[in-house]
Image (tube, coloured by chain):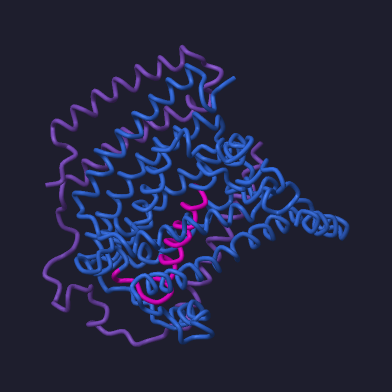
Amino acid sequence: MLANYAPILIFLVVATGLGLVLLALGFALGGGQKDAEKLSPYECGFEAFEDTRMRFDVRYYLVAILFIIFDLEIAFLFPWAVSLDTIGLFGLVAMGIFLAVLIVGFIYEWRKGALEWD
Amino acid sequence: MSALLTYVDELLVGLGVPAPLPYVVVTGIKIVVVLLPLILSVAYFTYWERKIIGWIQHRLGPNRVGWNGVLQPFADVIKMLFKEIVVPANSNRFLFLLAPLVSLVTAFSVWAVVPFSETFVIAEIDAGLLYVLALTSLGVYGVIIAGWASNSKYAFLGAMRSAAQIVAYEIAMGFALVGVLMAGGSLKLGDIVLAQQGTSLLSWFFIPLFPLFLVYFISGLAETNRAPFDVAEGESEIVAGFHVEYGGIAFGLFFLAEYANMILITALTVLFFLGGWLSPFAGIAGLEGTWLAQSGFHWLAAKMVFFMFCFLWVRATFPRYRYDQIMRLGWKVFLPITIIWIFVEGVLVALEVGPWAV
């Protein structure tokens, strides 16, 4: 059972190795001279005005929260969808009720404007 | 292929190589057999992209390096290898170099569970689809880390946009996949394809799941930050987005990951909705026994090539969406469509019609 996952581990190792080799090659062959101007962050050729670690729009945070809710919902739906032919009509109706509750929440969100971007 | 692998396995065991090593070698060969063509496809996908967009815009595209420019991708790779990797002064050096690696490893590792034919798949795990979703979600970290570690405003803005967009469309994609699971009845990608096996191409899932098929493919465009959803890169607004500070092969790794992800989306679309390696001509009189009616890798490849062309076609045809329009499409259009279709499927299951007929 777990042995089925062994190729994935090997695959991860191979992929990481490939990435590291490419990066190492890039550093070895790239060369080049460093100076303060070259190492400064790009900002249309100006001197950087302020640090980048600044405040950002709260809507991104909101999207992240919504994502967690819906992703959990999907995580619930996966095992349900796979076992559809064994749980029968009861399973279908139960999930219908579960989804209906979540849809009420979704409509609330929508009406509150949590999905607006301007 | 499998005969060769068994031969290598027996040879190594015969030579007295200790237990797990022959297995590792054989798996390693399989991985190379997948990765090498994948990297070559990425290379030629970029060449093809430039050619096709050139033709659509009445240009020639690359035509200098080699015959009609066929060596262009190799010239690009060599150029990228010899370019300097600049690590900006204010960046987090470790995270800055980790980000492209994360992108590449997640983009490549997904291929471990993709079945290329009925017999060839590297890791035949039961939770294949879950693994695919997990790794494509992890891919977001590459973007976020890159944008954060660069400590550059454009990179930061690009990363935020890109992450929010990927996350939003992942929801629509996940719901579309729930629909596929309801029809396929298994998380194993190979079983989902086999569930579509029937008399002809009419038993493929794109007919009962047509809205989900469209939502999945368009979400795939958005997931990979492709035109018309490429505001995360938006050359004319935020220069290049999250990888603006990356040069040389560090950028190359992002590039490789992005294109590998695009090819993956085409592969998954074909596997979930278009019968994977199954032949569309199976069961047609007069074609039995020919390669046309035979299922196999050639059909998977042919279908994938078509969708890869669609990626380029869409890029050359449609203007870019505005960011608020992208988010609206994801949350307010695709999400309701998928939820409604799950309900429709539920009713179909209860009534036992379509693929659920007993």
Residue B204 located left or right of residue A105: right
- Taken as a whole, is the magenta stretch helix, strand or loop? helix
**Residue B148 seen by the camera:** no
Q: Mark yes or no: residue B6 visible.
A: yes
Which quarter shows the N terminus of chain A? top right
Percent across and percent down for residue B91 are: 28, 67
Q: Is residue B206 left or right of residue B164?
A: right
Frontmost residue, A14 versus A73: A73
**Against B71, is B197 above or below?**
above
Q: Quadrant of residue B355?
A: top right
Give the colour in which the image draws chain B: blue
Q: Position of residue B14 (x, y in %)?
A: 88, 57
From the rendered image, report the letter of the chain displayed in purple: A
Q: Which residues are magenta?
A: B244-268
**Magenta stretch containing residue B260, yes or no?**
yes
Q: Is residue B165 magenta?
A: no
